[in-house]
Image: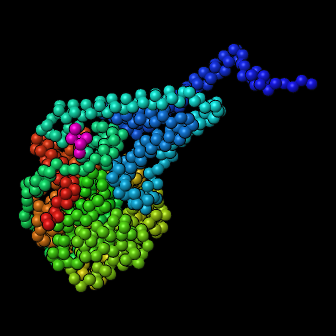
Amino acid sequence: MSQTNPNVVQSQKRKISPVRAKTSARKRMVQTILYMVIELLFILSIVLFLTWIKSTYSVDVAYEKPIFSMLVFTIVSILLLIPAPFNRIVGFILPALVALYGVAQHVYYDAFHTYFRFNTAMSLANEVTGASESVMEFIHFETFVPFIVLILIILIFTVIYFLLQRKRIKRIIHLYHLIAFLPLILVWKDAQRFDTMLETARHSEDEFQVYKTDYYIYETIPNNIQFVDTFGLYTFAYRDVQSLTASQLLSGNEREEIATFLADKPQWGDNAMSGIFKDKNILIVQAESFIDCMADPELTPTIWRLKTQGIDVHGFDTPTLPASTSDSEFMANTSLIPNSDGYAVCYRYVYNTFPTTLATLFNSAGYGTLAIHNNYGDYYNRENLFPNLGYTDFFDCTDLSMMDEASDSQVMSVLKYIITSADYKNMTFWITYSGHQPYDYGSVGVSQENVDRILAKYPNLDESYVAYLAKNMDLDQALNDLISELERIEQLDDMVIVFYGDHMVKGLEFGMDANYYTATGQTYDHVNRDTGLYIYNPTIEPRVVNMQSTALDILPTLANLFGIDYDHSTVLGRDIFDPSYHGFTFSEWDAWTTNDYSYDFIKDTYNLNGYDQQSAQSEMAYYIQMQDISANILKLDYFKPEE
């Protein structure tokens, strides 16, 4: 029996017919083409997704086109560099981050009517986590749609890869690496195009009204909405990253500019209201999310009493700034604007020197000063901020033997005895909490008794408005508790109550067609959305003061009412009762207003009401400069004594 020669067999195995070789080559080519087509379709789907995200969350402006192209081409280059199937992972992560930024800014805008900066987000991460229930109010199914779409894209192309491309096509990987560098050339060209656009704007715009120029807006970001309207949302992100990575070096002239500005500030003297409350005790109530239409003679009779039997300042409105409540209390306490490159002042500049604060004013007049809040002291870093502002004491919920997020009525059950038992002149600054989101029947400050009273009066009022009103009723009952105790011990005449809202209501609509007005029968008035300022003491005649004003003006006004001297050059606000003051309110999203005219900062349009436009433009330029000056005061710790 013959044996097969192994060498012959091996030789025969190596021999492949020309037809079979041709078929194998065609198969490899088909696989190669199929691989490339699928990968290019995958990349195209990601590009289309990114384009959809931009059109959904940003605005169509020329400046953003090169910036967004840079972003898209960078992602394309990365996807080309990484072979399948691993590029599916990156193809999810990077577009998801782009979508997340757009969605997060959209949610934030719904809540605050402005856009956040990265510094703000990083500074306030703990606060957002702590208020997760409030955040969830602004998140709906539509919020998740971009991520659902992206997941579907990734799943489809991952399945296609494993179904049709089980054998990797090694030879085209090198080609892909070469192609990957082509988009980077386009990134470089787009960067040049954007720089050219900025330089053109810099040299062609009105240098005499520099704060209106595109170049000024890009360099300083004076207003987040204005920036996005001019440059687009993703240019805002690009600029924000620049500010994070660039060293915040100042030119060296800022100290001189601050000194000149403060020296040239308008000065004011005594007026008819000077010293009318001298040596009286004072409770300052910064009411969470309070707006003027919550003063109701039946449901909130104590707040109504403060409004109608005290001094009612029409036109007072606290702007909603990036750090929300914290920024409002900072303005009220320092009369400075918390404008600080997106940083939360309560963290970034907590140990700055502030020579003139509400606490230092009253301390100098022999008062004991107390700041108090219903939450933990580390929330907005109050446990460090308020002592640095000069307060003798700061009490949080634990100091009152309570849990965090205590209701206003709970806090007042203790606070009234702290105030009334003091045998010295006292000033108390209370940051309330009941009015905080969320607005539903199970949230802090909402009692069934108050809900029933509201529905008995307004049966068609939506739950969210009922809950919001019930929360204000809780604060009202807390104030009534204090006033009743002061009346009982005959000390009410010696107490001044200053009451104002810390910012607009977040998440509730109070425009002309809001359910609140249709269900209550009240007539819409823009003043109803203002945060209100009421100054109450039973020894004075009730009066209404028409003055456009903000929390910036609280310190100078109270110093005048209590007859306390201080250096006017250390504050930026004005005394509301000064006859030479024509008022000023500002906002991130609404008109800037004086008693004489209003200015739409975003659209650059005036409603002059007969006022001289040149004078109005000069005044608005002054107020814009005031924001820059305040920012530099914080950055330089300007008031710190020289060593």
The N terminus lies in which quarter of the figure? top right
Apparent side of residue 68 relative to residue 526 in the rendered image (left or right):
right
Residue plotted at (29% across, 31% down): 192
The spot of residue 615 in percent (x, y) is 10, 44
Q: Is residue 378 above or below residue 413?
A: above
At 33% from the left edge and 41% from the top edge, which residue is drawn?
238
Residue 436 picture location, percent across and down: 39, 61
Is 545 contained in the magenta span? Answer: no
Q: Residue 136 versus residue 489: which sits nearer the camera?
A: 136
Residue 242, image x, y percentages: 30, 44
- Judging depth in this view, the residue of 532 and 386 nearest the camera is 386
Q: Hey, which quadrant is residue 467 in on the image?
A: bottom left
Residue 300 percent coordinates (x, y) = 35, 66
- Specify the segment rendered in magenta: 215-220
| Residue 96 visible to the viewer | yes
Q: Is residue 337 visible?
A: no
Please name the predominant secondary structure of the magenta segment in the image: helix
The answer to if 219 sits in the magenta stretch is yes
**Relative to 577, is 208 above or below?**
above
Please report the residue visible at 42 percent of the width from the left and 70 percent of the height from the top.
404
Left or right of 465 in this view: 576: left
Q: How is the image coloured?
A: rainbow
Displayed quadrant of residue 499: bottom left
Count the numbered circles shown: 0
Q: Quadrant of the C terminus?
A: bottom left
Out of 411 and 3, give the one closest to the viewer.
Answer: 3
Above or below, comparing residue 548 to residue 535 in the picture: above
Q: Vertically, is 182 above or below 291?
A: above
- Please tell me which residue is depicted at 21% across the width and 31% down the height of the picture: 200
Quadrant housing residue 355: bottom left
Which residue is situated farthest in the top direction here?
A: 18
Q: Residue furthest right?
A: 1
